[in-house]
Amino acid sequence: MKILLISPGTADDVDSRITQEIAYLYAKNLFAPHAITAVAALTPPEHEVTVHDEYTRGPVEEIIRQTCFDIVGITITSNQLKRSLSLARFVKTIHPSSLVVVGGIGIENLVSKKPDDIDVVFHGEAEETWPRFLQEYAQGSFLPVYKCISKPDMTRTPPPRWELMKEDLASYTAALLQTTRGCPFDCSFCDVIYTYGRKPRSKTIPQVLEEVKRLHQLNIKMIFIADDNFAGDKKYTKALLRELIPLNNSFTIPIDFTTQIDITIAADEELLQLLADCNFQSVMIGIESVNEASLKDYNKHQNLRMPVSEAVKKIQSYGIVVLAHMIIGADSDDKNVFRNTAQFLEEANIVHHLCHPLAAPYGTRMWYDLKRKGRIISTDADEIKDKLDIVTNIIPLQMTRVELFEGLADYWEEIYRPELFRKRAIAFIKGITYKPNIKAPGLSALKVQRKMLSRAFTYFLFEMGKEHRKAFFSVLGAAARKGMYLLPKIIYLYTCYLIDYKRSIHDAGVAREHARWERENPEMIKVDTSVVPVSEKFREQANEIVREAYFRLRERIFDRSGLFTAVLEVMVDYHDRSGERFEVFDEFQQEVVRTICDRVIDHVPVNDVEKPAEAGEDLPVGFTREMLDALDHAVRYRNFND
């Protein structure tokens, strides 16, 4: 079979445009597309696979016109939803016999629209479902929906087929690599635990090392370890880094690394040293808020274990740049949050950060909770679609939507000023106390570094304005005085800032324009219904759902009051996730309920003495009826914890 796998992209994508504006990067986009190369690796060798990333190869329509593919796969992201739908429609128009299949992190938004041009939808991980689909398709019978029920064994996951796009890899600033999936935390705005689980699953260390070797052979200069939380299993992470350090030092020029991680690493000096010695240039950390009450709103309790500014300084003392992810718009945020966030950045010497309005992703507990309260708006208007990193889908509690957008625009325009960045960057440099144990560059490495420095110098001397030129050379001078080994890191740091700066100009413009539009068109901001009814199909199968939750929880919770509360929490959470589209309680749905139960057990008091349910024991008489009544009350009128 002929299979085409597409990563959609548009010319107006802000990150791609900004990357291309920074001439010394010689790049067309930030990250090479992991999803399509990973699915290609799961495809049996007898099939002919073509991968196409529109960010580097341009629009895919001409290829589709020239060749009739048996299967066209599209990976969906939330910011390319319209483009994905357009591609599906185009394929069906040109080649009605081609099968259009979709998957990816934006699937929930897509599926709710039920487009006619899509034949097959994949939910979750693809290690088991993609090969199964291909086999069933070849036999002439396949399902319209494939759901990953079990959590695939990552030790059997093949490496992505990067060689299919090796000619394009130089057009990206970094390639992606996964070592683990899953996260032990349960932030209210995040859906990771339902997609990948709460217990991190890992590739073997030899697997990871082999992938790094292959990427090095393909001349990749930076690897983004795209785990949900690279330190979710610290024992594994440390063991991996101990093996990765000598491998990286064996290369003529060590690879730069970056990843996503949590703030608790600040308390682990051994891990910080390993990260530094492995040449981690930066780590993205979800700091989210400087407001403790907002962190509790987000269920982000891990960020309350130590003062965040001190934690950031500790991490950055190892020369590792903290990419701080911030969110504004929690129920506990008032209009002082903008000033307080700016003060935090100065106090913690944050040199690289992203700040977005709080948005409630479809299907998360936050989305359903706010929907019940009448605080989720419809995103059907073109002015809102594909802009949820700037234009939120919620109604804030302590400010209006217009005040949120205008406050963010003011914040972005102020905090990214070159002079303020210069002060924070110099403070960051002065705060570095650990010199990474990375081999000194040889002659070939020095030549590469000199070329990079020369290109950057030329760019800032002749293509940037006076403010940026002054800030760049001032920061570079501070780094040189601290140690010449820091110069490449400072180029990286300023490049990250430059991307942030250019994005802030774009985002502030979008926020101000949208604030104006909402002020002039208040009737266009329509609230989704706050009522989330319990459907008849859900009621018909409620006994099976309650049974699954009851006996899962009954193993740890024995008193009736505690068990009732825990089962109700599971039912509300599960209904929030699947109630509106609920069809049948199958194996996939059973696994969802078990995941929710395991989360609930973590914060519900349990008995000290285990007393597992006896064989043949049934639900208490009337228990399901009680649960349905309580569930109906919860979803119609209030969150049951209120």
Image (cartoon, rainbow, N blue to C red):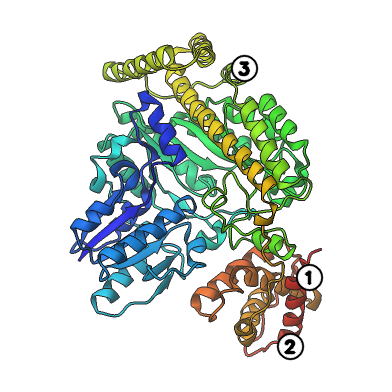
Of circles 1 and 3, the one toward us is 1
Q: Mark 1 points at which residue?
A: 637
* Above or below 512: residue 550: below
Tag shown at residue 423:
3
Could you tell me residue 599's position as x and y percent? 64, 63
Q: Distance between the residues labelled 1 and 3?
A: 50 Å
> From what the image shows, is residue 328 above or below residue 351?
below
Disc 1/disc 2 C-alpha distance (Å): 26 Å
Categorize mark 3 by other alpha carbons within 10 Å: few (<14), some (14-19), many (20+): some
First along the sequence among labels 3 and 2: 3
Identify which amino acid the numbered label 1 is placed on: Tyr
Q: Distance between the residues labelled 3 and 2?
A: 65 Å
Amino acid at dot 2: Pro
Pointer 1 local density, CA inside 10 Å: few below 14, some 14–19, many at least 20: few
Of the image marks 1 and 2, the number of the one nearer the N terminus: 2
Q: Which of 96 and 603 is in front in this view?
A: 96
- In the rendered view of the protein, which quadrant contains the C terminus? bottom right
Residue closest to the far front:
520
Quadrant for residue 639, please give it.
bottom right
Drawn side of residue 409 relative to residue 118, left or right: right
Q: Can residue 347 be seen in this view?
A: yes
Point out the tag, 1 or 3, that comes first from the N-terminus: 3
619 lies left or right of 279: right
Local secondary structure at mark 2? loop
Residue behind mark 2: 620
